[in-house]
Every structure is written in structure tokens, then in C-alpha cells.
Amino acid sequence: MVRQGHPLRIALVSPYDFAVPGGVTTHIVNLSERFRDRGHSVHVLAPSSTEEPEDTVEGFHRVGKTIVPLRTNASIARVSFSLTLGPQVKRILAENDFDIIHLHEPAAPLLPWYVLWHSRCVNVATFHASRETRTVYRTYRPFIKRLFKRLDGKIAVSQTARNFVWGTFKGDYRIIPNGIDAEGYGRELPPFEHLRDGKFNVLFVGRLEKRKGLPYLMDAMEVVQKLRRDTRLIVVGAFTERQLAKAQRRVKRCGLENVLFEGFASEEAKIRYLQSADLLCAPARGDGRESQGLVLLEAMAAGTPVVASDLLGYRTVSPGGSAALYVPPEDPRALARAIMRLMDYPETADRYRMAGSRRALEYSWDVIAEEVMGYYRELLRRHGSLRPNASMASAETFV
């Protein structure tokens, strides 16, 4: 039994290619760094298409080198079906006497399944996504439902994520959100010179996908620019040539001026865009796919007022609406009114800015790591650190 307060031996498991940036990878890296800073022993198990994570992530185990792109509704999951996964997992678990194994997106094939099957310690899982992973949940439900009986604790990053997974796998879920680098986004960086010409800058950050709602923002900007010509729309995020051409055609149809498609931005560049903007607009559609709304929190941490669709995943960021101005989704006129409200009433924008900055601190990775560690300790008190006879009757066949 692990004594409370003593350092833990922790394994963090991802099914996704760790060489490709993504939300799950970022989450695991931040947790591992903060757990290690607090004296815990942390190992990361994940497939990887390159050797880079072995050089950059302390305690990284490359479990699976062959990566397969797996389509899950609107997204592509890069996972491994390597035949060596089973033997690798058995060896790593045998060599390391873990107290906690924390699996992220445990329904995704294939690595989390092997880990759960062979684990002899306390197992906890975090469910990150919402509608994108429902297909995976349903496809593999008969098999992984048995595996999920080995989970001692379940975390969802938001109520939206919990609702989606609960529709397939009933049970109790602890809500612990994704964190943000509040200190990093709060640091002062020089704004971009080409955006400092006195125009009111409305920023959109995200992929050019339907669910992100950029067309509704363009329609709203058409209304705004009829009354205020001194406004500019800045679009930041990765996009294909086809997506860009389609967006530019809509700009032309709406008769918009001062629209910049800036493309992909590094984390530092994103901070500079946020600090160059007068407000961030997150006009996502009302189909429930937005799980949490990290971009809202990043904007708040940077001191940028936020206008966002009133979705459950976004509403949890500011339940009372004091830190973000919410509007009905898919309503360009309501969006236009909200933008002009913050343009015409700077004191209102300042109130949202200050409330947002305070709210963002509650989502710092230090805070989130403490919540997760507290949940680990709770599970260890309840279940103990070892389960020597926990193997399933047919475990020998799953190698």
C-alpha cells in the first residue's frame, strides 16, 4: 500500500502518435512535467512515428512505431496496430512497479487496451473528446466494455465530454478540465506591427472547419462593417488551399474588407495575435462538438475579451457569463451586436478582460495537476496500490 504523501510511480498512456502535436499529447506532457517537479516518478507510454519524443520527453517509452491514420467522424486519429505492442507493454509493466496507470482516451485502439489488460495496479482514465470519438466508442463497445471494468476511476475533461462517453459507457466521472499555460499566455509580448494601425481587430483562432463557425463570423462582420469600416478580421489557424479558397470566396460575397488569413501560428505567435486583438470571437456551431473551449481560456489569460457561442462546452469556462460574452450559436446578427457592444463600450470590454484574466488562473496546469493528483490519492485510499490477482481469466490470450 502506498502511504499518502509519498512519491508515486505513475504511467501516463496515450494511444496517439506522440510525434504529432495534439490536445492529448499536450495534456500528458504538462501533467508529466508537473508531477515530476513534485518528486514523482513518471513514465509516458505512447506510439510515435519518429524518435523525437524519446529525446525530448523524460521517461518516454516508444510503444509502437508503425502508425495508421484512423478516421473518426471529422478527425483523424493516428494510432498503432503494431504486433509488438503486447510484448512491449508486458515488459514495461513488469520492469516498473507502477502505483497508478493513467490512460488517456482508453477506448482508442490499441495501446490502452493492452495496458489495461496487463495492469496490476490502480487504473484511471481520462476522456477528452466528444462527438468525434463516439464512433470509436460504439465500434469497439462489446470488447472494451469488459476492459473498462478494470478502470478504478474515470475523468472527463468537461461536462460535454462526460455526456458523450456516458451515452456509451455508463458510470461515475470526475470532471477535471484541460489546463492552459496561464503564465505563458499572460506574459507580455510585442503585438504585430502590421496590426497596430488603429483598426479594431477581431480575432478568430481555429481550423477552417464547419463546426468552428467562421462563416457566421464573416456574416456578422458584414453587418459590423456597414456601420464601422475601421474593423479588421484576423483568421489564425492551419488550413488547406481548398479551405482558404472557399473562405476567400465568402469574403468576396459578403463584401468584406480588411480580412487577413494568417495561417498556422506557433504558441508564441498565437500569444502575440491575442495581444494584438481587441477581442477573440469563437462562433462555433450549435452541434455540441466543442468539448471545453481552450482557446477562450488562452485569450482570457492573454487579457483579450471573448465573444463566444453559448454552448455547454464553452459555457463551463464562465458559468455566470462574467468572463465571456455569450451569444446564441449560428446567429450572425447577435454576434454582430456583441462585437459592436465591446467596440462601443470600452469599459464593458475591460470588465470582461479583468474577469477573464482571473478565471484563466483557475485553469493553470499547476491547478489541474493538483486536482488530478488528489484524485489519484483518493483512488489509492479506496483501492490500494496493488491487485496481484486481477488478471482476467483469458488474459494469457491477449498478448
Image (cartoon, helix red, strand yellow):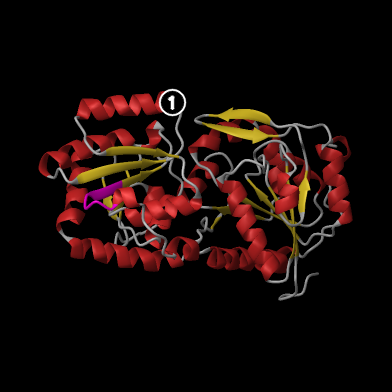
Percent across and percent down for residue 188 are: 41, 64
Q: Residue at x 69, y 51 (%)?
A: 151
How many discs appear?
Answer: 1
**364 above or below 399?**
below
Query: The N terminus lies in which quarter of the figure?
Result: bottom right
- Asked whether, in this view, residue 50 is left or right of residue 256, the answer is right
Residue extending furthest toward the left: 227
Percent across and percent down for residue 122 are: 74, 58
- The one of 28 and 53 positioned closer to us in this rendering: 53
**141 above or below 35?**
above
Give the structural element (helix, strand or loop) at label 1.
helix
Is residue 316 visible in the rendered image? The answer is no
**312 above or below 189?**
above
Tell me the kind of residue under disc 1: Glu
Q: Which residues are magenta?
A: 196-202
Is residue 260 visible in the rendered image? The answer is yes
The residue where tag 1 is placed is 241
Mark 1 crowd level (few <14, some 14–19, many ≥20, 10 Å Cα) = few
- Asked whether, in this view, residue 37 is left or right of residue 197, the answer is right
Percent across and percent down for residue 198 are: 21, 53
Question: Quadrant location of residue 82?
Answer: top right
- Asked whether, in this view, residue 37 is left or right of residue 243, the answer is right
In the rendered image, residue 149 lying in the magenta stretch gets the answer no
Q: Residue at x 75, y 71 (%)?
A: 7
Query: The C terminus lies in which quarter of the figure?
Result: top right
- The one of 124 and 359 positioned closer to us in this rendering: 359
- The one of 29 and 302 positioned closer to us in this rendering: 302
Percent across and percent down for residue 167 are: 52, 40
**61 above or below 288?**
below
Q: Residue at x 46, y 37 (%)?
A: 238
